[in-house]
Image (cartoon, rainbow, N blue to C red):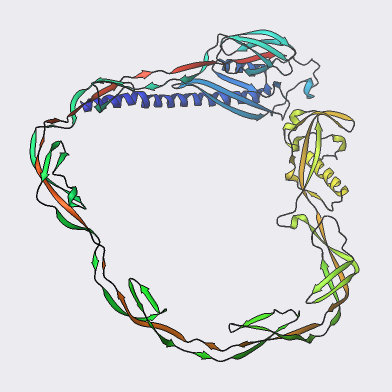
């Protein structure tokens, strides 16, 4: 039976887990291959057409019916060298529901379009009006029928709106805002909102109080079994016990007995027996004591009067102790300690000369405390203080300067210079700095945007006082995000502004100045202070006490009496049996899950 259950369980696990997993992996691999193939074909087609031509738009419409939505960053054909960002979103159904693959390709158009608009032909035909496409996606919604409003950039004439599923109707058009109503779409996502899915289960329970079991979804009928206890027949036996008391008069003639179900009356058996309850008896004792510190002795119960005797003796006569201290500040403490004895000042201190006053002429070169981008001017005087010589020196001649380029430092000293750049072209500010279209009137012949920025910024830095500034070309970058507004520059208003920043190095300087003059070292004096003290005579003789001491007898015993009682006790029949219920209970499978369906539409606005 257990082997059959194991086989059934293994089959259920394969059907519920392994097979769906293998199926899901196979479906994912198939759709991923299809997604990569379709995106490669669209990318190559856009390169060949030179942008989003009518043919490219038709291919994108056909792919949408295959659940692949293609979007383009720029409509229509574009100029040679411009880039187009192509977005892809592919939806397919897997074992666990709807899944989405998305990606993005950026291509540079290397095909030149021939026609009057691009100045590569002498054609006189008017330019062809190109139908533009704008792709948009509605938010995910629980309602399949709903109105949405979209802003279509550059909309002049709306040709039509199509949807990847269901039906779409144009409700109204207000400038670039188009309101549409979608309906009849398919579910794109299903989300579980509650409930659980429980598999069938069974278990064995014991110790239940009733045969009918119904707990936590498990039900069943249990069988009764002996849980504890037993059936004991009537019995009798002879019991002897004792009672204790401090006095014999308090023992009763009989006592009642009750223990383990036995009951009866016990009678006195014999006379009480006297026993020691606590305490002890200690006889008297004597002992000899030497080295005690007092005449009266009382310790550990021993007492007595002792006689004094000499343990050791030493006598030291009076002694005079002297010492002295020297100092160049004539500052001395009132007392000092020598060999553990405190000495006191004797008279006033005595003054003597150590070195005479000295004056000399010196000349030194002093370097500035820092490197700076400007040549700083040193002070005309210098306060000298070294090896005891002090004085104010005067500057001799003009300072000299040491020069370094800031790139020679480790790490290099880097300056940062910012420049505002104004433009009418938003896509230009979204690109790289090297590709911006700086006004050619200010550029030298053949000069690139980077070369122009280097030349003009270095000129600005020189005007600001920097010496030999060098713009680091590979550091030129956008500093800030794009600002939108109405910016006036050189008499022209521009709608967009972005800050260009660049790192630069420059020359730094440190001054050196020669100072000279007289410096003086003061004379040095020494002071001597005498100290003395008289150590009096000392008597260090030590005495102790000795003699015989006695400990009296003690009796702390307390007595109690023990009385025996004997008799026959009986126990009636007793039934302590307790029955409970046990057995197998089962829980059926249940699925209480609830779901919500979401709808979403891919819309294509055709306009010119």
Residue 239 appears in the rendering: no
Where does residue 512 sit, x and y in percent of width and height?
Answer: 84, 66
Is 113 on the left or on the right of 278, as rendered? right
Toward the front, the furthest residue is 249
Up the image or down, 79 lies above or below 173; here it is: below
Depth check: 473 or 178 in front?
178
Q: Residue at x 45, y 23 (%)?
A: 27
Where does residue 76 sit, x and y in percent of width and height?
Answer: 70, 20
Q: Residue at x 78, y 83 (%)?
A: 525
Is 578 on the left or on the right of 60, as rendered? left
Up the image or down, 477 lies above or below 412; here it is: above
Is 212 on the left or on the right of 85, as rendered? left
Q: Determine which quarter of the picture holds residue 224.
A: top left
Is 231 on the left or on the right of 114, as rendered? left
Up the image or down, 481 lies above or below 128; here it is: below
Depth check: 103 or 212 in front?
212
Picture mark count: 0
Where does residue 481 sit, x and y in percent of width and height?
Answer: 73, 34
Quadrant for the C terminus, please. Answer: top right
Where does residue 355 sit, x and y in percent of width and height?
Answer: 79, 85
Depth check: 573 or 602 in front?
573
Q: Residue at x 67, y 19 (%)?
A: 53
Quadrant for the N terminus, please. Answer: top left
Toward the right, the furthest residue is 397
Residue 183 appears in the rendering: yes
Q: Residue at x 50, y 16 (%)?
A: 596
Depth check: 382 or 179 in front?
382
């Amino acid at each position: 039976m257990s082997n059959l259950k194991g086989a059934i369980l293994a089959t259920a696990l394969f059907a519920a887990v392994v097979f769906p997993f293998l199926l899901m992996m196979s479906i994912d691999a198939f759709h991923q291959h299809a997604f990569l193939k379709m995106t490669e074909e669209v990318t190559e087609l856009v390169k060949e057409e030179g942008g989003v031509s009518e043919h490219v738009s038709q291919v994108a419409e056909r792919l949408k019916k295959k659940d692949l939505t293609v979007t383009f960053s720029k409509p229509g054909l574009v100029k040679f060298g411009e880039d187009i960002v192509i977005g892809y979103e592919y939806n397919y159904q897997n074992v666990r529901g709807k899944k989405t693959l998305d990606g993005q390709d950026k291509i540079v158009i290397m095909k030149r379009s021939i026609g009057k608009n691009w100045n590569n032909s002498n054609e006189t035909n008017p330019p062809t009006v190109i139908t533009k496409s704008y792709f948009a996606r509605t938010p995910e919604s629980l309602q399949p029928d709903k109105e949405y409003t979209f802003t279509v950039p550059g909309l002049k004439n709306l040709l039509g709106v199509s949807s990847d599923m269901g039906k779409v109707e144009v409700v109204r058009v207000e400038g670039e805002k188009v309101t549409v109503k979608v309906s009849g779409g398919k579910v794109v996502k299903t989300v579980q909102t509650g409930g659980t899915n429980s598999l069938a289960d069974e278990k064995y329970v014991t110790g239940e109080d009733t045969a009918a079991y119904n707990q936590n979804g498990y039900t069943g009928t249990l069988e009764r079994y002996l849980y504890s206890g037993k059936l004991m027949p009537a019995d009798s036996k002879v019991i002897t016990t004792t009672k204790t008391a401090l006095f014999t008069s308090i023992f009763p003639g009989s006592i009642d007995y009750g223990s383990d179900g036995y009951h009866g009356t016990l009678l006195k058996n014999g006379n009480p027996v006297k026993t020691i309850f606590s305490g002890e008896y200690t006889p008297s004792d004597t002992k000899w004591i030497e080295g005690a510190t007092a005449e009266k002795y009382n310790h550990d119960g021993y007492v007595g009067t002792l006689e004094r005797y000499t343990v050791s003796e030493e006598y030291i006569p009076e002694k005079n102790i002297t010492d002295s201290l020297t100092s160049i500040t004539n500052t001395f403490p009132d007392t000092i300690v020598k060999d553990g004895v405190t000495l006191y000042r004797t008279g006033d201190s005595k003054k003597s000369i150590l070195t005479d006053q000295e004056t000399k002429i010196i000349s030194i070169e002093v370097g500035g405390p820092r490197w700076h981008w400007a040549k700083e001017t040193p002070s005309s005087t210098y306060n000298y203080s070294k090896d005891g010589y002090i004085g104010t020196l005067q500057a001799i001649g003009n300072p000299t300067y040491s020069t370094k380029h800031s790139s020679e430092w480790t790490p290099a000293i880097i300056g940062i210079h910012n420049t505002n750049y104004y433009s009418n072209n938003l896509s230009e500010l979204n690109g790289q700095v090297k590709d911006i279209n700086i006004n050619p009137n200010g550029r030298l012949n053949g000069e690139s945007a980077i070369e122009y920025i280097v030349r003009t910024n270095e000129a600005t830095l020189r005007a600001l006082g920097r010496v030999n500034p060098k713009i680091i070309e590979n550091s030129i970058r956008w500093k800030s995000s794009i600002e939108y507004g109405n910016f006036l520059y050189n008499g022209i208003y521009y709608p967009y502004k972005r800050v260009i920043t660049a790192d630069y190095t420059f020359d730094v300087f440190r001054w050196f100045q020669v100072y000279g003059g007289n410096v003086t070292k003061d004379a040095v004096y020494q002071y001597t202070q005498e100290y003395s003290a008289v150590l009096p005579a000392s008597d260090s003789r030590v005495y102790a006490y000795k003699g015989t001491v006695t400990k009296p007898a003690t009796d702390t015993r307390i007595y109690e009496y023990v009385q025996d009682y004997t008799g026959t006790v009986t126990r009636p029949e007793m039934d302590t049996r307790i029955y409970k219920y046990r057995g197998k209970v089962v829980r059926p499978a249940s699925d209480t899950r609830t779901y919500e369906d979401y709808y979403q539409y891919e819309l294509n606005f055709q306009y010119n």
